[in-house]
Amino acid sequence: MKNKFFATLLTATLVTSFALSGCQSNTATNLSTASQQESNTQTATSSKKRYYKRVSVHDPSIIKADGSYYIFGSHRAWAKSDDLISWENISTNINTEYKTMFTDLWENYCKTDSNPDIQGNMWAPDVIYNKDMKKYCMYMSINGDEWNSAIVLLTADKVTGPYTYVGPVVFSGFNTTTHPASYTDVYQVLGKNADLSRYQSTKDTKLNAIDPCVKYDENGDLWMAFGSWFGGIYMLKLDPKTGLRDYSVSYETKEDVSDAYYGYKIAGGHEVSGEGAYIIHTNGYYYLFLSYGGLTASGGYQMRVFRSKEITGPYVDQNGNSSIYTSSANNLFLKIGIRLMSSYSWSGSSEIRVAQGHNSAFVDEDGRIFLVYHTRFSNRGEEHQVRTQQLFVNEDGWLVSAPYEYAEESLSPSGYAKEEYVGDYEFITHLPTAYFQASGTGDVGIVKAITITLKEDGSITSEDDSISGTWTVKENTPNVSLSIDGTTYKGYFLKMPNESSQKEVMTFTALGDNMCIWGSKQ
């Protein structure tokens, strides 16, 4: 939750991963010794050597430009990769010029006595190439600790800058006293004598103007999703000629549907957790990613997914649950939204990832889909790093994730021989309501693998007799259907390197009843 309760903690924990003052380092500094060794380890599979070089970029948003991949994150941390495997930190002019760029906005709106320094308050930018402006447009949140924030626009001719500040796109935290709406565009949108009372209630429309995600829809219209806990996630139409708000479009104020200032409501609300909205379009659907929970290692941070035929919604999960909440709830303990991965442990990974979240995603030119997110670990405090995993669309049109970090794997178009499927697998069910919590008696909330067997006769058994079922593969495809204890899961078999040894193994990934499952052959 990036609001006044977590801003101080976020700044403190990120200091261990990269400098917050002046210019960012051009290397992934301050990682633990173990992580440094991991970064430089030479690994191989099928005679191909891979070098994983790590970076620490919180809230990574990805864009592909000039044949390379760039991620932009909070606190002026950016990185570049040519292969989604080896990353290096980069800098832009924003790293050194931010104080002068945002002086007016910071001094006259966002700054408070409790939060007097801008350097830890530039959050979660999203960069998109604007075809009308012929510019790279960066949308960034300038954050205040009383919800007095704004999402601003910067533009550049190259994705690496230099960036020029254009102006604010949307505000939050405004009122008639401490953060006067007269500084903002609120009266321009709502009228001179607008009633602002609903924007003061966290149970109504009070949100934080953070986490922009800017996308073109299939009609070529430009939209920005944004927002956070409390009031929810909203979406505004932008003017593609300016990159700013399209003031010619008006919205109706209707509870849990839309708001005259913030636009269409697409998720959250009524004080439930949720931030980091990100949208991709593929397979005829818009897929909405959200991060639930608090961003710390034991805060329950996690990614959940919904989809819609329209970019403005309605977004629903596999079971038809809406992404919009109409009453208060602790949604960490609800089975609403597809949780892509839990805090989990198995032998194929040498690390236990926890609090994975604030992801971006993109569809490459060849149709491959990639998930990019930051993760913390069960035994490394608040240290965080970026990870990338491939996503696939199953037969029912839902996203499932490859079980291991991206290693140039691909689905076999014709599947595999049956004997390659048969055998013992480490098996994980990504429980939607379990999350890592460090405790004096040991870590809790980590899903641990059990052993199951896919038998030649199509049956499934487990070592402890806890599950049973059947499995089938569609002929001449890698498409698998697993029926386990009455639930049908659909997904794929996939050969790929595991993470602990880089040995190529058979895996599967599938989804059923809003729950993702993974298998890795022993």
Image (cartoon, rainbow, N blue to C red):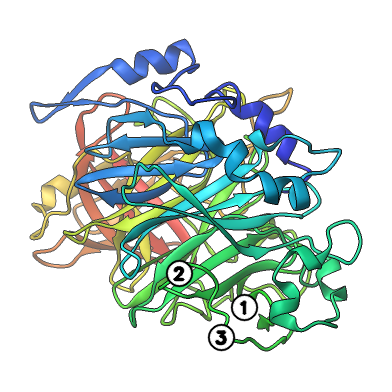
Disc nearer the start of the sequence (3/2): 2
Position in image of residue 132 (x %, y %):
33, 70
Q: Which mark is residue 250?
A: none
Q: Amino acid at mark 1?
A: Gly
Residue 56 appears in the rendering: yes
**Residue 272 or 500: which is nearer the viewer?**
272
Compared with 197, 116 (above or below) is above
Disc 1, SS: strand
Position in image of residue 45 (x %, y %):
15, 29
Q: Which mark is residue 242?
A: 2
Q: Disc 1 vs disc 2: Cβ atoms closer than 8 Å? A: no
Q: Residues within 10 Å of mark 2 (few under 14, many from 20)?
A: some
Q: Amino acid at mark 3?
A: Val
Disc 2, SS: loop
Residue 446 appears in the rendering: no
Position in image of residue 88 (x %, y %):
34, 28
Compared with 317, 126 (above or below) is above
Compared with 239, 172 (above or below) is above
Label 3 sits on residue: 249
Q: Amino acid at mark 2?
A: Thr
Q: How many numbered marks does the figure carry?
A: 3
Q: Residue furthest top?
A: 33
Q: Which mark is residue 263?
A: 1
Disc 3, SS: loop
Q: Tell me if 437 is positioned left or right of 456 in this view.
A: right
The residue shown at (45%, 36%) is 93
The residue shown at (78%, 43%) is 5
Disc nearer the start of the sequence (1/3): 3
Position in image of residue 321 (x %, y %):
58, 75
